Image (cartoon, rainbow, N blue to C red):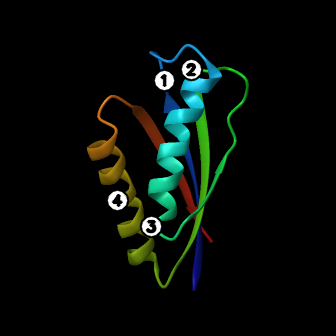
Amino acid sequence: MLIVHALLTLDLPYIHSLKGRRKILSSIKERLKNQNMAVVDLSGEYPKEGVVALCFFAANEQEANNKIEKLQKVLERQFLDLEFTINYEIL
């Protein structure tokens, strides 16, 4: 059993308040919780950037990579106007 830790960094140039960022991040967190991932918001005070930490279990490295790819596809499909990067580590 492997543990996967991922950091999702979002660029939100059109958001001007913390309330707007919180709305988007809450939507993302809810969608990812349905994927059996632990999700936490690590964002700072700057509203135009968001950071979300993810953690999940995988049976092997291929399953971990498949879940990361699925995560990318969900974000690209559901949040078309977001620019994001995903950095992950398999332990």
In percent of width and height, residue 63 lies at: 40, 76
Image quadrant holding the C terminus, namely bottom right
Label 1 and label 3: CA atoms lie apart by: 23 Å
Q: Label 2 amino acid?
A: Lys
Quarter the N terminus occupies: bottom right
Mark 2 is surrounded, within 10 Å at the Cα level, by few (under 14), some (14 to 19) or many (20 or more) other residues, namely some
- What residue does disc 2 label? 48
Amino acid type, residue under disc 4 in the picture? Glu
Relative to residue 81, is residue 20 drawn left or right?
right
**Left or right of 43, for residue 62:** left
Q: Answer whether labels 2 and 1 touch (C-beta < 8 Å).
A: yes
Residue under the image location 48 percent in, 23 percent down: 12
Residue indicated by mark 3: 35
Residue with the mark numbered 1: 12
Select label 4 or label 3 by which is in front: 3
Q: Which residue is mark 4?
A: 69
Please tell me how crowded label 1 is: few (under 14), some (14-19), or many (20+) other residues with Cα within 10 Å: some
Q: Is residue 18 above or below residue 5?
A: above
Q: CA distance from mark 1 to mark 4?
A: 22 Å
- Label of residue 70 in the image: none
- Whichever of labels 1 and 3 marks the residue nearer the N terminus, that label is 1
